[in-house]
Image (tube, helix red, strand yellow):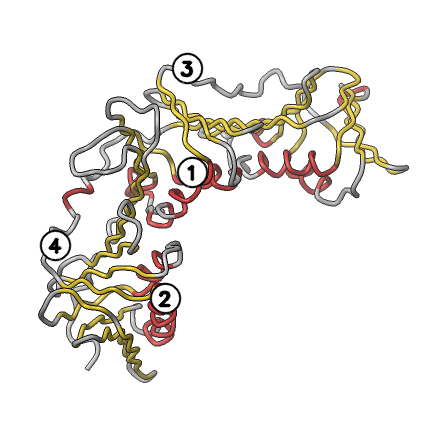
Amino acid sequence: MDFICKKDDLEEGVQAVERIVSTRSTLPIIGNILFEAKKAGIKISANNLEMGIEILISAKVLKEGSVLIPAKTLGGVVSKLPDGDISFKLKDKGLINISYKKSIFNIHSLPPDEFPQLPKVKETKAFEVEAETLLGMIEQTIFATSSSEDKYVLNGILMEIGKAANERSNFRLVATDGYRLAKSGEKIDGVEGLIKIIVPAKTMGEVAKVLGNKGAVKITLSNDQVAFKYENIYLVSRLIQGQFPDYKQVLPKGGGLKVLVETEALLKASERAAVIASQSANIVKTEVRGDQLHIMAQAPDVGSVDEVLEVEVKGKGKTSIAFNVRLLTDALKVIDDPKVFLELGEALSPGLIRPQGEEDFVYIVMPIRTQEVVA
């Protein structure tokens, strides 16, 4: 194997695959990165047995071949290389010669024979979505997934493709950790029937990292795998098997107060209230009084806060609900619309946040049962 490539292309490829390399596996070989030099360029791959990724970079290939290089060592070397042409050459006894200008690195490699190949998902069920659209939907939902190993089904994002009752969109992502739920939807072409799969949050996080703002992503599905093809990148992942909760059961039926408030103002007020709330289980109380929304928190021996926002209120009555302030700010940070509707029901009813100009994104946060948190 012998090739020459640009440092920037090499670094982009290595960084993209290095993130998924497993360092804790009982199978040491998957701690390596696979290089395959072919006429079309250099294919760089990694596979942790749950998820695999390959990226094709441009190169002048002088001799075809393939080799495994330890990911940790390679990543450390590549990140420090100077700009310009980088030469890779496989020497005797599996030694990789990495040279640039007048300098040389020599790294021990392994033969690629036992490295697990990335599976290719059959294109029986496939569709395309704009990269910018998918990226936005992932950002609006991934933060609401669970990290608890006891709730493995909630460690993923539900992907629904197809029409469903009371839904304007035909492509939806839903995430929940049991305390809050985020749902984002869009209309796309080329979708038939109704398909539901659960994609690991780690996979969706990696997809988000490689997406740009242009072009389309091809998503291919099977019973136990999903593949994402975007430009020169191919990523494949196992699916989470199990029953995702029926999110429609927790959607509020309406009837409460609907408060229209500036997104940035609500976020900043919540973040200020969080300074006090962080000393008292992150609890804040939201209360509507006339045309004002109060965000309040109190902590013994620390102090209290009462943030007051001028809002537009639809509906009559008075409501007071306690929430975990972190769950409120997480959602507000991913909303681009300048104003949001905050829908509040009775004291133990879920709260709902929806951007004013976006019908297909909804965020639900469960209330906290508490005594009078704020006097």
Residue 201, quarter of picture: top left
State how far apart marks 4 and 2 are (Cα): 23 Å
Quadrant in which the C terminus is drawn: bottom left
- The amino acid at mark 3 is Lys
In the rendered structure, the answer to whether residue 72 lies left or right of residue 193 reads right
State how far apart marks 3 and 2 are (Cα): 44 Å
Please state the total of marks drawn on the protein image: 4
Q: Secondary structure at mark 1?
A: helix
User: Mark 2 sits on what residue?
Assistant: 267
State how far apart marks 4 and 3 are (Cα): 43 Å
State how far apart marks 1 and 2 are (Cα): 26 Å
Q: Secondary structure at mark 3?
A: loop
* Label 2, residues with CA under 10 Å away: few <14, some 14-19, many ≥20: some
Reading the chain from its start, which is encountered first: label 3 or label 1?
3
Above or below 226: residue 123: above
- The front one of 246 and 67 is 246
Reading the chain from its start, which is encountered first: label 1 or label 2?
1
User: Mark 1 sits on what residue?
Assistant: 204
- The front one of 101 and 67 is 101
Residue 41, quarter of picture: top right
User: Mark 3 sits on what residue?
Assistant: 122
- The amino acid at mark 2 is Leu
Q: Residue at x 29, y 43 (%)?
A: 150
User: Mark 4 sits on what residue?
Assistant: 254
Above or below 176: residue 193: above
